């Protein structure tokens, strides 16, 4: 009766051939891959250099100011500033700056790739049908799978982390850019056409401004996914808070892991709350105010 519970036939996939093909490509395109790796490493280093040359109290004040402006509540700004300073108080300030530089570099590249693709597929059903399965695959693929080709092609370090993070985090901004533009009121679009708007004017003066809240939600989600992925990328040599968590796991140091993990959470919460406030204008304190109106 084993045949009832055992699959009758198993395909033997030659995974070694796939590995050999990728390695052969890595060797043949070594110069190009090195150029990309150096460029990405330089971008991360430049952002890190800029962050390291800003005094810590200026960064804390900037968090307070941005939190205040984004959330329209000075108490929220002070609270975020205290949390941000707490990362430095536990001795993880430099690691936090490294993590933040990788996140910012990854998000910048993801937006440069994702926004044009989202705009493209918003105006073409055929392009949307082609891209949608690819996005579904990218979004459901286990995150650790992205580490393998990034490591093989670009080696250990921040460049591989940026590549893997971009692939993982670019999906929300593509989806929500396309969705936001498609959901623009058709009567508004028709009115713009009736007034003689060109295709470019229709896109940049009508559709994108109308879709901006949805697009910015995608930007926020991309930022959060990048924050999550950059910690995972410590497995392929990305420095920062993720490496601190990984070392704590390897050495079974619970306290060290909790402190580093809490720092990751603080940074993610600050980025999330501030971007949500800037992009949506919502009050996090639940005061019932939104965009100047009382619900």
Image (cartoon, rainbow, N blue to C red):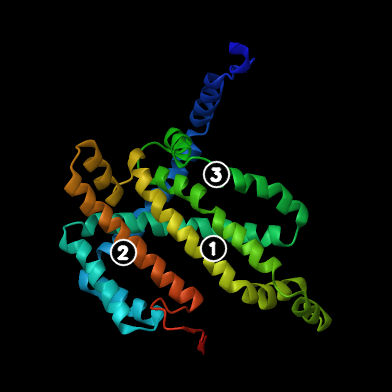
N-term-proximal mark, 3 vs 2? 2
- Identify the secondary structure beneath mark 1: helix
Which residue in the structure is indicated by mark 1?
A: 218
In the rendered image, which quarter is residue 177 located in?
Answer: bottom right
Which residue in the structure is indicated by mark 2?
A: 50
Residue visible at 55% across and 57% down in the picture = 172
Can you name the residue that lies furthest to the front here?
1
* Front residue (pair 246, 9): 9
- Identify the secondary structure beneath mark 2: helix
Which residue in the structure is indicated by mark 3?
A: 140
* Front residue (pair 204, 11): 11
Is mark 1 in CB contact (under 8 Å) with mark 2?
A: no
Whole-number angstrom distance, CA of label 3 to CA of label 1:
17 Å
N-term-proximal mark, 1 vs 2? 2
In the rendered image, which quarter is residue 211 located in?
Answer: bottom right
Whole-number angstrom distance, CA of label 1 to CA of label 2:
26 Å
**Tag 1: Cα neighbours inside 10 Å, few (<14), some, or many (≥20)?**
many
Residue 178 percent location from the top left of the image: 65, 62
Q: Is residue 240 visible?
A: no
């Amino acid at each position: 009766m084993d045949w009832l519970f055992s699959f009758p036939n198993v395909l033997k996939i030659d995974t070694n051939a796939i590995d050999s093909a990728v390695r052969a490509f890595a060797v043949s395109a070594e110069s190009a891959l090195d150029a990309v790796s150096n460029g990405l490493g330089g971008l991360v280093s430049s952002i890190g250099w800029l962050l390291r040359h800003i005094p810590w109290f200026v960064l804390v004040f900037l968090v307070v100011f941005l939190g205040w402006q984004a959330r329209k509540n000075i108490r929220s700004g002070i609270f975020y500033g205290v949390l941000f300073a707490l990362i430095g108080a536990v001795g993880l300030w430099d690691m936090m700056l490294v993590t933040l530089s990788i996140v910012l570099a990854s998000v910048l590249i993801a937006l440069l790739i994702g926004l044009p693709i989202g705009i493209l597929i918003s105006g073409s059903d055929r392009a949307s049908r082609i891209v949608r399965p690819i996005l579904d695959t990218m979004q459901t693929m286990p995150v650790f799978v992205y580490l393998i080709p990034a490591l093989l092609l670009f080696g250990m370090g921040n460049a591989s982390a940026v590549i893997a993070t971009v692939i993982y985090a670019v999906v929300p901004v593509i989806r929500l850019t396309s969705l936001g533009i498609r959901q623009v009121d058709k009567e508004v679009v028709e009115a713009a056409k009736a007034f003689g708007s060109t295709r470019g004017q229709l896109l940049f003066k009508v559709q994108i401004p109308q879709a901006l809240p949805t697009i910015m939600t995608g930007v926020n989600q991309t930022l959060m996914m990048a924050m999550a992925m950059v910690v995972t990328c410590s497995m392929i040599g990305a420095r920062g808070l993720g490496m601190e968590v990984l070392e704590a796991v390897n050495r079974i140091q619970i306290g060290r892991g909790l402190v580093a993990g809490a720092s990751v959470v603080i940074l993610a919460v600050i980025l999330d709350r501030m971007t949500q406030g800037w992009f949506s204008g919502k009050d996090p304190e639940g005061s019932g105010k939104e965009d100047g109106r009382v619900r």
